[in-house]
């Protein structure tokens, strides 16, 4: 159930509204209605053993306590509520109606309510871990709060393809975390899940004031700790929209030289003292000979990042004129034939003496 549209007269003193909270010590739901003259509600819930219970009141007061449990004579047995729903109908201004449907859920003893697109909890406490009902890998723990703490709301936002690309994300989910407390009045630690496509790779956490400004999202500079599938950010003092992206490594860190461990050949190749580190490898032009440069997970670009595939060689007049390069995925499946180069010439196609380093050749169509 989602909340229905709310209608009320422009001249009505208080806009019709209903609040639902839970008092743990007494095990009571607390309902407070405002801006209506008559109230009715139905509350349904499931406890932790799967038993369903419900309460209906067709002539409710503006404030009601609803006990979650059963009472016989003066003996009451509380229920440990798991989740449920609350439907409210109010009448005001000569029989106009106000309706609201509220979903609720308990996570680690904390009462959360769902409103349109986000889960919220009232009056947060210091040191408590607030785990998002919609994703157990998202959590907030407050390390500083004002004298009168406020609420916390967590929303999973679905990004458009354009937004995913603009921020360099590899998932279409961002997290909009808000409160009625002012930035700077509080500090908290935040935990977020790493998208499957980024597990094992370097990641960054970026933030923006809204989903619409994600294209200019800034990198979180607070302490970030990462484990296998989550990141934890320490000592944040503002609420905003957060998204996890891959790290766009500088091109120099993505270069594999012939002398590096990630260079391999199918048969031994000869050494020639030339090139960047004086360790060029070469082999006679025989069909079936190949060389391979393998990038690590940290070097591989992720969706939304800008990259290009380049190579260079030592010019010689007996080198092949059609050295062909191919791109494979980590399973050895061909992604594309990048193209062929003439190793008799420079990267720009000009002539040069034997032994000249060609300069970088960027494969057309390999840029993303």
Image (cartoon, rainbow, N blue to C red):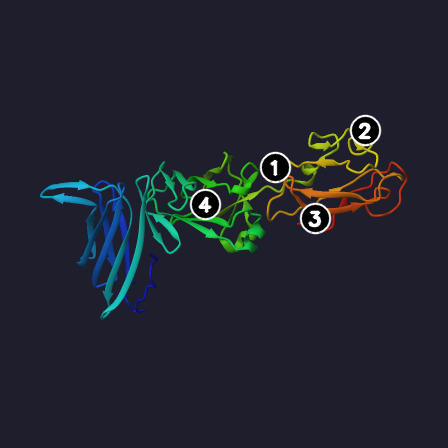
Label 3: which residue? 366
Q: Report helix, strand or loop for mark 1.
A: loop
Q: Report helix, strand or loop for mark 3.
A: loop
| Discs 4, 3 touching: Cβ within 8 Å | no
| Discs 2, 1 touching: Cβ within 8 Å | no
Label 1: which residue? 297
Q: Position of residue 13 (x, y in %)?
A: 27, 65
Q: Is residue 14 visible?
A: no
Cα distance between the residues tagged 3 and 2: 29 Å
Residue 87 or residue 47, whichever sits in front: 47
Q: Quadrant of residue 270?
A: top right
Residue drawn at x 78%, y 34% as measured from the top left: 276
Q: Is residue 332 left or right of residue 66?
A: right
Label 2: which residue? 271
Residue drawn at x 43%, y 42% as measured from the top left: 138
* Mark before the other along the chain sequence, 4 or 1: 4
* Mark before the other along the chain sequence, 2 or 4: 4
Cα distance between the residues tagged 4 and 1: 32 Å
Q: Position of residue 41 (x, y in %)?
A: 23, 57
């Amino acid at each position: 159930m989602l909340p229905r549209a709310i209608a009320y007269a422009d001249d009505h003193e208080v806009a019709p509204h209903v609040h639902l909270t839970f008092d743990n010590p007494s095990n009571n739901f607390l309902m407070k209605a405002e801006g209506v003259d008559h109230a009715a509600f139905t509350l349904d819930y499931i406890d932790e053993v799967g038993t369903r219970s419900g309460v209906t009141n067709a002539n409710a007061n503006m404030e009601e306590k609803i006990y979650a449990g059963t009472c016989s004579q003066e003996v009451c047995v509380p229920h440990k509520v798991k989740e449920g729903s609350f439907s409210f109908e109010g009448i005001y201004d000569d029989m106009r109606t106000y309706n609201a449907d509220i979903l609720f859920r308990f996570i680690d003893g904390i009462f959360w309510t769902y409103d349109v697109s986000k889960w919220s909890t009232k009056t947060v406490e210091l040191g408590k871990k607030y785990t998002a009902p919609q994703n157990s890998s998202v959590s907030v723990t407050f390390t500083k709060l004002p004298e009168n703490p406020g609420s916390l709301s967590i929303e999973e936002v679905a990004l458009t393809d354009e937004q995913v690309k603009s921020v360099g994300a590899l998932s279409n989910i961002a997290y909009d975390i808000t409160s009625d407390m002012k930035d700077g009045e509080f500090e908290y630690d935040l935990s977020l899940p790493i998208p499957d496509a980024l597990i094992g790779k370097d990641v960054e956490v970026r933030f923006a004031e809204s989903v619409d400004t994600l294209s200019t999202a800034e990198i979180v500079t607070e302490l970030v700790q990462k484990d296998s599938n989550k990141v934890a950010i320490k000592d944040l003092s503002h609420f905003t929209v957060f998204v996890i992206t891959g790290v766009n490594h500088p091109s120099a860190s993505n270069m594999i030289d012939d002398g590096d461990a990630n260079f391999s050949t199918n048969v031994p190749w000869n050494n020639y003292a030339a090139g960047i580190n004086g360790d060029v490898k070469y082999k006679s032009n025989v069909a079936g000979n190949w060389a391979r440069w393998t990038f690590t997970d940290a070097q591989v670009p992720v969706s939304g990042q800008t990259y290009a595939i380049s190579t260079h060689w030592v010019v010689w007049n007996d080198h092949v004129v059609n050295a062909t390069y191919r791109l494979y995925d980590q399973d050895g499946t061909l992604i594309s034939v990048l193209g062929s180069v003439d190793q008799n010439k420079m990267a720009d196609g000009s002539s040069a003496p034997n032994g000249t380093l060609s300069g970088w050749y960027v494969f057309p169509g390999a840029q993303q």
